[in-house]
Amino acid sequence: MINQTSVQLGSVRSVIRELFEYGKKRKAQIGEDNVFDFSLGNPSVAPPAIVEETLVDILTHGDPVAIHGYTSAQGDVSVRQAIADYINSRFSVGIGADNIYMTCGAAASLCITLNALLNEGDEVITIAPYFPEYKVFTEHARGKLVPVQGTEGTFQPDIVAIKAAITPDTKAILINSPNNPSGVVYTEQAIKDICKILQECKENGQTIYLISDEPYRELVFGGVKVPYIMNYYADSIVCYSYSKSLSLPGERIGYIAVNPACGNAAEVYAAVCGAGRALGYVCAPSLFQHLIARVIGTTSDISVYERNRNRLASALESYGFEVVRPDGAFYLFVKSLEPDSDAFAERAKQHELLIVSAKSFGVEGYVRVSYCVEPDMIERSLPAFKALAKSYKK
């Protein structure tokens, strides 16, 4: 018999992907302009012009063998050094090329990191709401995901609940800030409080790693600060992706950064390299490694997302919805108008609104609205949102 867990995972898509596929069918039936698809976190802003210009230059003037050939398994050393230099210029953590492992996006970064750290039965604490694939990634690495509810209304980490969730089997805490699906940025005080708990555990003989999933780091508004965990806790690992910051989700390029201050940094990095080898996640796309080295520090025009956030949040609030005002990413977390968020999301379909129930994110009573869409679609969708709200007042 073949692996039935894999059969199940392959037979049923995630709730987000199911809704996206439903949207494609619905658009074919009634026309694309008549369906308001807020399902997928797919950047709607084009990559900055320098990305295409640099790609053309690399392909025109570069060595074809080097461009299209294998790099080192963990990534080209000059690319890794460029990333390390950039991180040091921003956060002064003393990281080097041999702390960086190039990956096919943040999903690969997380899978490699979890497989590097976890032994059978180890527990990984995360804060709800959380990206649903965390459970899949953790269980594939033979671990157990332990969700801890964030503080209702703000969805900041509940420090007391996190401390209570720690057991002798806890191996890591996995955070995601700016958060998918809430858009919340965890405060510096919250990060300090988490790190204080972990430091106390270490002093008592238990090392717990802090993993930061950071595909949305650059997508913040109003000068909000996203604390860099290496500045707060030694045993930390950053999983980064350029999918959102450079609008390159299809190119699958990112990295793992192991804190050089980690008590066993060389061993952790060796485990990362070993997990990457075992999973087949070696030699991330060469062309895009070389691209990243030359455009590092550049971001797409995120002002579009900020305008979308402001317009949609203000409109929904005026219709009577409760909205968690996000400081980053490109999601609105909206309280559903009935306790069952699955039922609410289904009812939204009657108005051709495709929004994701937060039940799959580990939270009940909310939905995620991805506002990484064309501003015109937001304007066209507002009457549908208004009608949805009105349908609950009758």
Image (spheres, grey):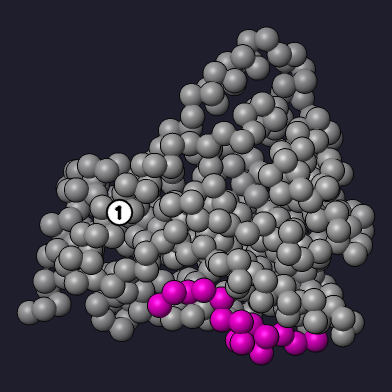
Q: Which x, y percent locates residue 201? A: 81, 82
Seen at 68% across and 85% down, the residue is 163
The image quadrant that residue 142 belongs to is bottom right
Residues 325 and 266: in front is 325
Seen at 66% across and 90% down, the residue is 164
Q: Which x, y percent locates residue 214? A: 61, 54
Residues 89 and 8: in front is 89
Disc 1 crowd rating (10 Å Cα; few below 14, some 14-19, many 20+) is few
Q: Reply yes or no: does residue 85 show up in magenta.
A: no
Task: State the extent of the magenta-drawn residues as a range.
Answer: 153-168
Q: Which x, y percent locates residue 168? A: 80, 86
Q: Which x, y percent locates residue 185? A: 51, 63
Query: In this picture, is 348 found above or below 65?
Result: below
Q: What residue is shown with label 1?
A: 310
Residues 197 and 265: in front is 197
Residue furthest to the left in view is 394
Looking at the image, residue 22 sits to the left or right of residue 234; the answer is: left
Looking at the image, residue 120 sits to the left or right of residue 346; the answer is: right
Locate the N terminus by quadrant.
Answer: bottom right
Looking at the image, residue 46 sits to the left or right of residue 115; the answer is: left
Residues 25 and 346: in front is 346
Locate the C terminus by quadrant.
Answer: bottom left
Q: Could you tell me which secondary element the residue under label 1 belongs to?
A: helix
Query: In this picture, is 155 found above or below 255?
Result: below
Seen at 75% across and 13% down, the residue is 63
Query: In this picture, is 342 found above or below 73?
Result: below
Q: Amino acid at mark 1?
A: Asn
Q: Reply yes or no: does residue 159 show up in magenta.
A: yes
Looking at the image, residue 246 sits to the left or right of residue 36; the answer is: right
